[in-house]
Image (cartoon, rainbow, N blue to C red):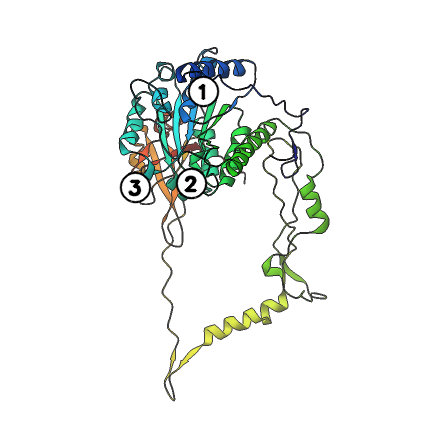
Amino acid sequence: MGTAYNFDYDVDLGPTSIPLGDAGNISDLPLEEAHAELQATVCEILSNGSIPFVVGGGNDQSYPNAAGLLDFASKTPGATIGVINIDAHFDVRPLKDNKAHSGSPFRQLLESNTFLSGANRFIEFAAQASQCSVLHYNYIMESREKVQTGVITLAQLRESKGGPVAVFKRVLDVFFASCDYIFISFDIDAISGADAPGVSCPATVGLSSQEALDICLEAGKSKKVKLFDVSEFNPKIEEYRTGRLVANMFYHFAMGIVLREPRKKGTLPVGRTIEKLVGGPTPKRQRTKKRETEGVSPVAVDYPPVVPSPARGPKVHAVRSTPHQAPLVITEEEVEHGPAAKRGRARRNKKINLGPEKQVAAPVTAPKPEKPPRIAPVNTKTTVHVANLPFTLSDEAFGSIFSGYHVKSAHVVRAHHNNRSKGYGFVEFESEVDQVKAMNEKQGTMLPTLNGEPRAIVISIVKPNPK
């Protein structure tokens, strides 16, 4: 699987850093009895203060896992749970002869009185529209009358800023902000078959193995995540590559758990130290002959020195080494007489030669599109940031989504060079009460798109500008 100490993240998975244990296998019993034993085992492990990481074959295991978390949460009055199904499929198919199967775990969850009785939440993540029935999509949307649900497809993740990992972090931080405990069910057929061939239903497209590992790392970092399961690993189809991927998913999840706790300040991780000693690759634009600057005063130095982050500070994220960039110095002489200045004058004076006595000026380029007006600074106490918007949404339609909450202003952020939507916007309300109410009631609202795949909006509080 890998070494106990990972110097990229400065994480030690040795016994003194994180206690790891094997809770054994569920007995070889009829399916319903095996599910009951799994549910009891999950609840017991959680009650002992540990975090279960359940590896299974069929996805039918996910409902008894969720039921075990519900049993544990019931010991704390008012505790709520959030469930994420990372899967190419919805797995909300009806039972067969009143019996569970690998396609039914989340229908069982959404029809569980225990789950419906609290302010719990459920979301489908990385679902592929080509693999999911619209009837099942409608079923999940209709379930919103009883419990907060949402769907984020793989296509939406590919269009979103930051990609699947960034959206996953926002789901944890925003959609599940009100939940006390989170269960992440990861069906590995959501990963591309090129990276995970050993599954019952290999995918032609999907998450990459690196995205899957990064998601596991972020899941481990969240203190709310109390349960994680991996489903659909089928070693009879392919064992070696997919088995190593599953092992590395656990490895990254465990690293994330270590990164939950505040860390002591120390020296740079090994990777960073080596980078500092030997230097990094020179950026392409600096691979030129060194300029002679002796006796000439510089105009500007644009690059501040790199300040390394402490290796063991609080909230440590993945440490990536970056080469130290030397300052790019432009001299006054080059500004006035350099090649760039000469080229500029040549372009301005250029004419088209049409023969004797037929000199005409070069054609004037078309004017750039008019830039949209810049938006004034917002009041962070009454404003929300709304992401994952359809790119065709107008300001008027955007404001109408929050029409019942005393909206002061609403605008979609657009690019200055072509006036196209960037997929997010801001809404300012008349009071903080309207802001909080709109966040709670409109979170995850589905908006239609041109391709027919609705988008679930993500609402968050606007952070004040540190400047």
Q: State how far apart marks 1 and 2 are (Cα).
A: 25 Å
Location of the C terminus (image quadrant): top right
Which of the two discs, 1 and 2, labels the residue nearer the N terminus?
1
Q: Secondary structure at mark 2?
A: loop
- Residue at screen point 28% across, 27% down: 139
Give yes or no for contact between labels 1 and 3 (Cβ–Cβ under 8 Å): no
169 vs 327: above or below? above
Q: Does 82 appear above or below 252? A: above
Q: Sequence order check: which comes first, mark 2 or mark 3?
A: 2
Q: Is residue 52 visible?
A: yes
Would you name the residue on which mark 2 appears?
A: 206
- For the image, the number of numbered tags is 3
Mark toward the start of the polypeptide (1 vs 3): 1
The local secondary structure at tag 1 comes to helix
Image: 67 above or below 127: above
- Mark 3 residue type: Thr
**Distance in Å between CA atoms under marks 1 and 3:** 35 Å
The amino acid type found where label 2 is placed reads Gly
Q: Are marks 1 and 2 in contact (CB under 8 Å)?
A: no
Q: Quadrant of the N terminus?
A: top right
Residue 30 vertical placement versus 129 (above, below):
above
Which residue does the numbered mark 3 point to in the structure image?
449
User: Residue 37 location in percent, x, y?
Assistant: 46, 14
Q: Position of residue 126 (x, y in %)?
A: 40, 36
Name the residue carrying label 1: 65
Q: What is the spatial separation of the Cα atoms under label 2 and label 3, in whole angstroms?
A: 21 Å
Q: Which image quarter: residue 423?
A: top left
